[in-house]
Amino acid sequence: MRDAFDAIPVGESAPALAPADPPQTAGTRRQEIATGVRLSFAAGLGMFPIGIAFGMLVVQTGLPWWVAPGLSIFLFSGSVELLLVGLMAVGTPLATIALTAVLVNFRHVFYAFSFPLRVVRHPLARLYSVYALIDEAYAVSAARPGTWTGARLVAMQLAFQSYWVGGGLVGVAIGSFLPDRIEGLEFALCALFITLTLDACRSRRQVPSLLLAGLALSLALLLVPGSALFVGMIGFVSLLAVRYLLTARRTDRRRPAAQDTTRDSSCVTQGVDHA
């Protein structure tokens, strides 16, 4: 061990060693899975009733019942699924549906920067974890940084999908037995977005994004009221990209000044030491 440290040249720091994950036995793996499921309960209580509304909405719009579990299994994106039901019911072109889904889920690209995907070792499990990266999974993982293992993370995501698929099936069953149509289920999508907006604006750093969203929607309503939602989302994504570039440029300008201040402080310290 001493020879290894002696081999490091003077003036250079030793390479940082990445902490290895502790080996998991069958008992600890079961405990991690149980912990992941337990951590999903709070957000899952909110996902299940929205899933019921989604299943009932599928039946009431005249779509086949299997659309609800099909979308929930192969797409698994609550906001997009609720939006797609309305688009499919009115015969929206496939290209418009695909572009709308990309714009609505574009926020997941930024989720991936801080999501603890590195703890998932198995390639198939990692592929599923990327696929099941939803708002609830990101929120729960961000609230407990540095505590995740692969089994705990994947178990939480599987539990979330189970809540959503189960809620959709319950909604389909309820909707098929109801004699009359229930008005207002379409508002489930708006309610979901309102909840996400309020949750995202808990800190002042996100208030500019809220203002940009309001600006994009207002301009879309004035210019193209017939396609306000679609054009508004495109405008919002464009404004977010501009904000990101301006913030990155501002950060790059501040960084050299901070480095110069640090350098001057070190020079003063060295001068005092030599004195």
Image (cartoon, grey):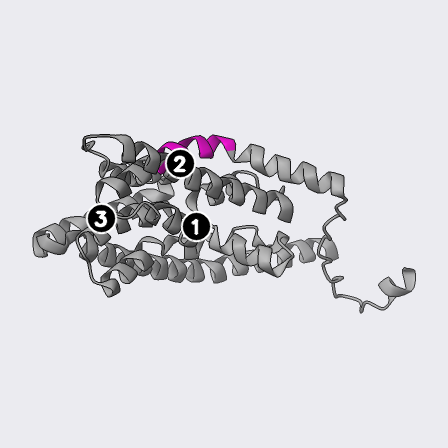
Residue shown at the point (24%, 35%) measured from the top left? 185
Instruction: Tell me if 272 is positioned left or right of 242 in this view.
Output: right
Rendered image quadrant of residue 17: bottom right
Rendered image quadrant of residue 47: top left
Q: Main secondary structure of the magenta part?
A: helix
Instruction: Tell me if 157 is positioned left or right of 179 in this view.
Output: right
Q: Quadrant of the C terminus?
A: bottom right
Q: Position of residue 86 (x, y in %)?
A: 22, 48
State the mark number for residue 167.
2
Residue shown at the point (48%, 30%) measured from the top left? 42
Q: Is residue 233 visible?
A: yes
Q: Which residues are magenta?
A: 41-51
Could you say whether the residue bearing mark 3 is in a helix, strand or loop?
helix
Residue shown at the point (41%, 34%) measured from the top left? 48
State the mark number for residue 73.
1
Q: CA distance from mark 3 to mark 2?
A: 19 Å
Q: Please, what is the three-letter code of the amino acid marked with disc 2? A: Gly
Disc 1 packing (10 Å; few <14; some 14–19; many ≥20): some
Q: Nearer the viewer, residue 61 or 263?
A: 61
Instruction: Give the labeled residue for mark 3.
Output: 86
